[in-house]
Image: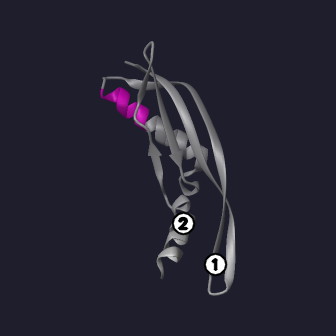
Amino acid sequence: MNLNKAAVVCAVMCPLLGCAMTSDVMDTGNGTYMISAAAAPVRGGAAGANSVAYKEANKFCGSRGGHAVVITADSRDVYQGAVVGSGGSIGGGVFAAGNTNMRFRCEN
């Protein structure tokens, strides 16, 4: 497989793999925090991003002896199209990855 073909396959497949990630927790003042998360379609899109963000928020608050209480969660699905071809056949589809920005506070 040449380098260009490998780059195209990676660009198409990476959003479909089980990737999910979060930002660092940000202090937004007055005892509130924010975390952002993204999740691939196979991880549940926006719902998966919310789940990942909530787990990380609880981990953050747990290290301070408490638990997370969500104030707001602004989430959305991000639709991506993919076209894959091999051996003269072409396939593809539309997939929904998800993002969320979650504001929370820690309570004991």
Q: Nearer the viewer, residue 74 or 83?
A: 83
In 3D space, how far apart are the residues under numbered discs 1 and 2 (Cα atoms)?
A: 12 Å
| x 68%, y 74%: residue | 91
SS assignment for the magenta stretch, majority? helix
Residue 100 % position (x, y): 56, 38
Residue extent of the magenta highlight: 56-63
In this view of the protein, which residue sits in the foreground, 39 or 6? 6
Query: Where residue 70 sits: x, y (%)?
Result: 52, 26
Q: Residue at x 41, y 31 (%)?
A: 25
Q: Left or right of 90: which side holds 63?
A: left
Q: SS at mark 2?
A: helix
Q: Is residue 58 magenta?
A: yes
- The label on residue 13 is 2
Is 67 or 90 nearer to us in this picture? 90
Q: Which residue in the structure is indicated by mark 1?
A: 85
Q: Residue at 30% of width from left, 28% of height from top?
A: 63
Q: Secondary structure at mark 1?
A: strand
In the rendered structure, does residue 38 fall within the stretch colored magenta? no
User: Closer to the N terminus: mark 1 or mark 2?
Assistant: 2
Give the residue type that dot 1 points to. Answer: Gly
Compared with residue 9, is residue 16 higher up or lower down, i.e. above or below?
Answer: above
Up-down: is 16 above or below 3? above
Taking 54 as reference, is 81 left or right? right
